[in-house]
């Protein structure tokens, strides 16, 4: 469930996404033993994709993948259908649920469609999410996912260019972390390499299973 536990914080989504719908951010708290301490305050929108007007251009974002290699986001994803999410592996609830929903949807698609869709997870907690940590965590969410990490400033700048708010993780006095980021998945079309849609955390596996084949073809969702 995505019900609040405690230390919930809801903040306004950046202007680009707010123009599309009234969405919210989440302050995810990860304790030292990873017990849930916060969850998203979900919006009342449906699980369908929200159109972005105008569509968003891919950021100039160069990070490091799980093999320790440089990954130029715009270059490596050019001409490909992409689902992009900013989150972190120690998240107790929202991040793994969103990624597993996508993973479950992908697994049910025909093999050729599974091979075409790129699912990219960019950490918002790079100090803890090393390439090794991402490499061990992502397969549990879905096969073939690409995990990226790097400097926080680069990640924050890339997210900001997409209307995604990412705040620097804060260690609390009790030893837990608060990692504030928006919980939207951006869908990039292979036809023009722009994000035409965003999914809130209310989207489920069935939604992604329905939409990914259309996204692969560059069709309207």
Image (spheres, rainbow, N blue to C red):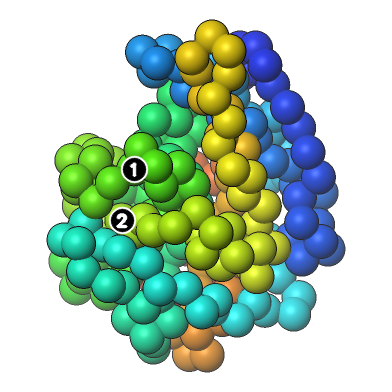
* Mark seen at residue 140: none
> Residues at badges 1 and 2 in contact (C-beta under 8 Å)?
yes
Q: Position of residue 9 (x, y in %)?
A: 73, 27
Q: Is residue 115 above or below residue 137?
A: below
| 44 horizontally vs 161: left or right | right
Query: Up-down: is 128 above or below 191?
Result: above
Query: What residue is shown with label 2?
Result: 147
Residue at 28 percent across and 46 percent down: it is 130
- Classify residue 92 by image quadrant: top left
Q: Residue furthest front?
A: 173
Quadrant in the picture for the C terminus: bottom right
Q: Residue at x 50, y 33 (%)?
A: 94
Q: Secondary structure at mark 1?
A: loop
In this orientation, which residue lies closer to the viewer: 190 or 212? 190
Q: Say whether residue 67 is left or right of residue 84.
A: left
Task: Report the residue at 47% width, 23% height from top.
Answer: 30
Q: Nearer the viewer, residue 167 or 139?
A: 167
Label 1 neighbour load within 10 Å: few <14, some 14-19, many 20+? many
From mark 1 to mark 2, how far is it between C-alphas? Answer: 9 Å
Q: Position of residue 32 (x, y in %)?
A: 40, 16
* Residue 104 at least partly seen: no
Q: Which residue is label 1 attached to? A: 129
Which element is circle 2 on? strand
Q: Which residue is at 58% across, 18% downward? A: 172
For residue 40, say whether it is visible.
yes
Relative to 91, say whether 86 is above or below.
below
Q: Nearer the viewer, residue 186 or 165?
A: 165
Residue 66: % across, % down: 21, 57
């Amino acid at each position: 469930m995505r019900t609040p536990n405690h230390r919930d914080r809801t903040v306004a989504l950046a202007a680009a996404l707010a123009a599309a719908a009234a969405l919210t951010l989440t302050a995810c708290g990860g304790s030292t033993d990873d017990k849930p301490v916060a969850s998203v305050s979900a919006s009342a929108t449906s699980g369908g994709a929200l159109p972005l007007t105008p569509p968003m251009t891919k950021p100039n974002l160069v990070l490091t993948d799980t093999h320790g290699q440089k990954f130029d986001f715009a270059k490596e994803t050019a001409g490909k259908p992409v689902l992009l999410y900013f989150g972190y592996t120690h998240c107790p609830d929202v991040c793994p649920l969103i990624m597993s929903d996508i993973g479950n949807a992908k697994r049910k698609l025909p093999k050729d469609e599974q091979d075409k869709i790129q699912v990219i997870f960019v950490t918002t907690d790079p100090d803890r999410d090393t390439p090794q940590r991402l490499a061990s965590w992502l397969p549990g969410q879905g096969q073939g996912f690409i995990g990226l990490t790097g400097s926080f400033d680069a990640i924050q700048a890339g997210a900001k260019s997409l209307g995604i708010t990412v705040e620097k993780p804060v260690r609390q006095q009790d030893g837990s972390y608060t990692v504030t980021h928006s919980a939207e998945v951006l869908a990039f079309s292979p036809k023009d390499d722009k994000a035409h849609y965003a999914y809130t955390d209310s989207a489920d596996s069935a939604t992604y299973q329905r939409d990914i084949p259309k996204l692969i073809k560059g069709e309207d969702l």
